Amino acid sequence: MFHSAADGISSPICPTPSSTAQPLRRSTCWGRPIHQPGRTLRPSRYNPRMKKLHLAYMKFTDPSVAEKLNSGCPALQDLSFNQSTLGSFKISSETLKTLSTTSCTYEGIEVSAPNTCSLKLGVAGNVQLHDMPSLVSAWVYVCPGGIQHLSRGGYDLVALLCNAQKLELLGFGSILQNIMGNSANEALPFNNLKSLVIEERQFTDFYNPFAYFLQFAPNLASLTFDQWTLNKWKVCRRRR
């Protein structure tokens, strides 16, 4: 492991060519590589032109790293983390339009990015998302046991997603049951929703979610229920 005390990021050695994991290739920020074999990471400069930053196989040990990334790249629009350890992660951005965290482990994520149009999120820890009124599409996977980290049994998360036009919801069976079965919950309108995919390991109740979205998503043109894909494909790691 290479460590940088200055920024709290650790970077693993690049995998060998035979590995299924692809090495990072010169992701840049602040005018120099974020990852380069044999060198420590020192992102301490300012790059006003950086709009896209994708990081994989990283370890964040400093909770302020996200804010450093944001302040160092004030024009950032596309931020992605994959197969990374994020710790306690908090980011606030007015420019961010695309946010992705997949196959990551973390204690908590807090995001305030009102102009986000595209969201990809694996729920593996505490999640706090602030309003995203510009959201167009979202892909969200609730890992096994992930519902315990969501407020009001996942109701608040779904409420944040209900303005989207395209949704892919994986592992949402218990959340949907909670929304439909709790009379204290106000019905959520999905007035903009046109395409919906729900993937679950095993559907114990097909009809009620089907009827719910037919009632509260008047513009829905495409609906898919799938319990096969999620069994084949593990899209985020369990917390250890």
Image (tube, grey):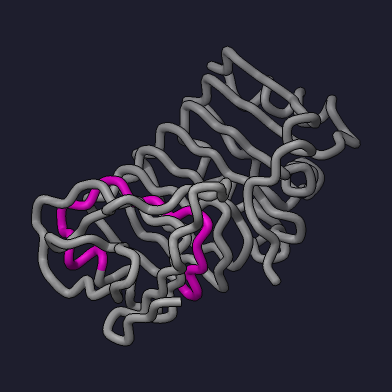
Q: Quadrant of the C terminus?
A: bottom right
Q: Foreground: 129 or 217?
A: 129
Left or right of 69? Residue 206 is: right
Q: Position of residue 32 (x, y in %)?
A: 16, 62
Residue 41 visible? The answer is yes
Q: How many marks?
A: 0
Q: Position of residue 54 (x, y in %)?
A: 35, 51
Residue 121 visible? The answer is no
View extreme (top): residue = 221
Q: Foreground: 23 or 177?
A: 23
Q: Residue at x 39, y 48 (%)?
A: 99
| Magenta span includes 224 | no
Answer above or below: position of 11 versus 155. Answer: below
Left or right of 38? Residue 108 is: right
Answer above or below: position of 40 versus 206. Answer: below
Q: Residue at x 30, y 43 (%)?
A: 97
Q: Position of residue 198 (x, y in %)?
A: 69, 31
Residue range highlighted in magenta: 69-88
Left or right of 53? Residue 152 is: right
Q: Residue at x 74, y 25 (%)?
A: 225
Q: Residue at x 33, y 78 (%)?
A: 64
View extreme (bottom): residue = 5
Q: Foreground: 113 or 229?
A: 229
Q: Quadrant of residue 229?
A: top right
Q: Position of residue 62 (x, y in %)?
A: 39, 81
Q: Quadrant of residue 5?
A: bottom left
Q: Foreground: 17 or 163?
A: 17
Q: Quadrant of residue 214?
A: top right
